Amino acid sequence: MNYILIDKDTIKRRVQDLGRQISNDYSDCEIHMIVLLKGSFIFASDLIRELTPNVRVEFMKLSSYDGQNSSGQIKIDQDLDCDIHNKHVLIVEDIVDTGLTLNTLLDVLHQRKPASIEICSFLDKPSRREAPVNVKYIGFAIENVFVVGYGMDYCQMWRQCPDIRVIDDH
Ligand code: IMP
Ligand code: MG
């Protein structure tokens, strides 16, 4: 079975809310947004248009050494091409699952001495957490189901779906 968990109008309203909240929190500084490829590209492109502070957009691509299973061994496939020293960094992620990816990434980025780092994730699956990660901005918390759409994929499919769908035949 395959059904809509979050429809596109609900997504739109929530992204507007997040945009207001983040704009308020960063009203006196520039945001160095780090968009984690590929899954968060649609969320980030909607979110950025709801932000009033100046936003610099950078991309990183991370992967897990053992493919599908999160191992905590994170490989940087594409790094930043800018210096984040003394900058206010906002990481934009599609979904936090075990937390292993972001936990490792935070260690890497903290070594570069930014002024601050916060995370904005469109979805969160708190019941799956294995590594602690403080996610300041969360679009929606969901149960332990596999979702696709709004940039998220299963085997590189479904990213273009405008709603979040649960697929249990994956
Ligand atoms: P983790 O938090 O290190 O376990 O990994 C999170 C990453 O796993 C996300 O950025 C997604 O790429 C992927 N992921 C986890 N759950 C889902 C899902 O339900 N659908 C699509 N991708 C997912
Ligand atoms: Mg991701």
Image: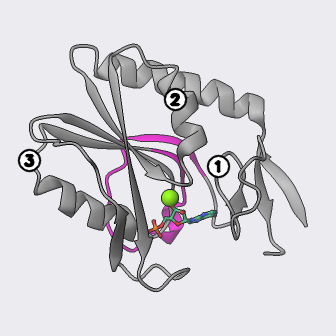
User: In the current view of this chain or complex, which residue is farthest to the right?
Assistant: 1
Q: Amino acid at mark 2?
A: Leu
Q: Amino acid at mark 1?
A: Gly
Q: Quadrant of residue 153?
A: bottom right
User: In the current view of this chain or complex, which residue is farthest to the front?
Assistant: 81
Question: Are the residues flagged by discs 2 and 3 in contact, CB closer than 8 Å?
Answer: no
Q: Which residue is mark 2?
A: 47
Q: Which residue is mark 3?
A: 113
In what element is the residue under mark 1?
A: loop
Q: Which residues are magenta?
A: 121-141
Location of the N terminus by quadrant is bottom right
Q: Which residue is painted at 8% across and 47% down in the image? A: 113
Q: Is 136 in the magenta?
A: yes
Q: Which residue is mark 1?
A: 151
The answer to whether residue 100 is above or below residue 37 is below
Dot 1 crowding, Cα within 10 Å, few <14, some 14–19, many 20+ = many
What is the image's colouring? one colour
Q: Is residue 50 left or right of residue 28?
A: right
Mark 1 to mark 3 CA distance (whole Å): 30 Å
Q: Is 42 in the magenta?
A: no
Whichever of labels 2 and 3 marks the residue nearer the N terminus, that label is 2
